[in-house]
Amino acid sequence: MDRHPCTTAAAARGGTLTALRKRLAGVMTALALALGGAALGAQAQDASPPPTPEAIAERAYTYGLQQAIFYGQRWIYTQNDAAANDIYSGVNRFFWVRKQITPDFPVVTPNATTLYGSGFLDLRAGPVVIEVPAITDRYFSVQIMDQYGIFRMIVGSPFNGTIARKYILIPPGFDGTVPADFPTTDIVQWPSKTAYGVVRMAVENGSDAEIATINAYQDQVTMTPLADWMANGHKGVPQEGRDIVAGDFVIPDGLPDYAVGQVDKQTAEQYFTLLNVILNDPTMPLLTDSVLETDMIAQLASIGIGPGLSFDWATLTPDMQTALETGFKAGFDSVRATLKTNLIDMNGWGIVRNDGGFETRWMDRAVIADAAWAAPDKNISHGGAFLFTDADGQPLSGSNKYTLTFDMNDLPPVTQFWSIPIYDTNGYFVANEINRYTVNSFMLAAGDLVAQDGKLVIHVQHEKPTDPDQAKNWLPAPADGFRFTARFYGPYAPLTDGTYNMPKAVKVD
């Protein structure tokens, strides 16, 4: 007997449902087994021994080094009013470098191809407004960094244009009204109540007239608390004539003695004491929803460090002090070793990996903090191309003569400019008779450097070349050891992945 089509379809559906129930039953059984296995795995994991204090201390070093240097620098900028501290500026105020950096300005690995300003924002009382004038004749950038080393605001000529703009940083918990003056593109929701800002402006020839032009731009850049901005007719308050407002952040014992040169000077006792202060600082909240950081905080709590805890080194047992010192040294050594071994090789030049992701990549974060704290984000400049040795792998020395040879058809690929400064082995400029501490693309464009036969040959040596053509391209070297740290503003991919053929330093007779 033929079945009615509806009856046949119903039977088919019934068979399908039966099969589906069997499949679901199988899936549930497998899921139950999996969950049971996961539970057993979790129990086994829970049964494993907890990390030792040494291991916790070592991990805590890579976790917290960036934040610790941030804290130390904030003290230098906002609280260290010693007469010898030229960069003391207070909160919500820029310290400006108003002339090209020369050897009399003792900054490590300085850049003479930009003038810059830097300072710390204090958002505890509410939003802060940063105003930048129209700058159409040169490169400029503004970048704002949180305590984790993450640049959450990057603006300027290559990024959003050259017109005058104002930006407002809104701290967590702000329940006021944002003035209607700000487009949503220039409203920045900031994750903490503290920040570090850097403004850079390119120096193309260094003439007195150009420096005066840049200084005028600097005078128009303002950092103003919102209440003062509104009281000033919705305009930034110029720094000239403004009183310095000192920070009032906790100053751990010893910080004034080790904040300058912090990484090499601080002891385990000082570091962990400072880390506890940081974790209790209301201006520096933890990351939101970070499982990795939550685990770190739990481990730190086991040694008495963390939110709501009072850490006192003197109350630790000798064994615990030794354990923390051992872990601290292991962390220090690990960061320094990683800096040397984890560089991207660019034909002998080593590029620091600075790809961001600092929420979870603590070693990368610590390496950047150690090598060049607050170094530009790779979107601004890949500013960490180091060269310590010549083409034969020997240390660079002023007792030798070298050449760096660029193909004019294959210059460093940038949207903005490149700069190759030379330093002594400690990273400082050394005075020379022609006051030249770098070679850069501006000098090439202006004719201060001369190419011949399609090649740009830079002569690196201590004594001035006797050949007039070589003297034009002379980069004076210190008498003893030296090194380079090249910077590339607006780099193309080959300068970040290491595939560009950067010239080696070739020793010549």
Image (cartoon, grey):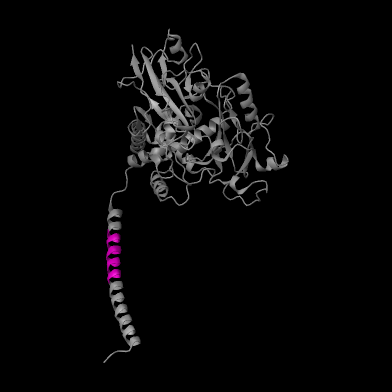
The reply to whether residue 232 is visible in this rendering is yes
- The answer to which of 336 and 273 lies nearer the viewer is 336
Residue at the image point whose x is 41% and y is 51% from the top:
291
Seen in the picture, residue 91 relative to 303 is either above or below; the reply is above
Position of residue 51 in the picture relative to residue 181 (left or right): left
Counting from the top left corner in percent of width and height, residue 379 is at 48, 38
- The answer to which of 405 and 393 lies nearer the viewer is 405
Position of residue 428 in the picture relative to residue 18 (left or right): right
Counting from the top left corner in percent of width and height, residue 331 is at 36, 35
Position of residue 31 in the picture relative to residue 141 (left or right): left
What span is colored magenta in the figure? Answer: 26-40
Indicate whether residue 291 is drawn in magenta.
no
Indicate whether residue 30 is drawn in magenta.
yes
Residue found at the far front of this picture? 453
The reply to whether residue 79 is visible in this rendering is no
Counting from the top left corner in percent of width and height, residue 500 is at 38, 31
Counting from the top left corner in percent of width and height, residue 231 is at 72, 41
Picture quadrant of residue 142? top right
Picture quadrant of residue 387? top left
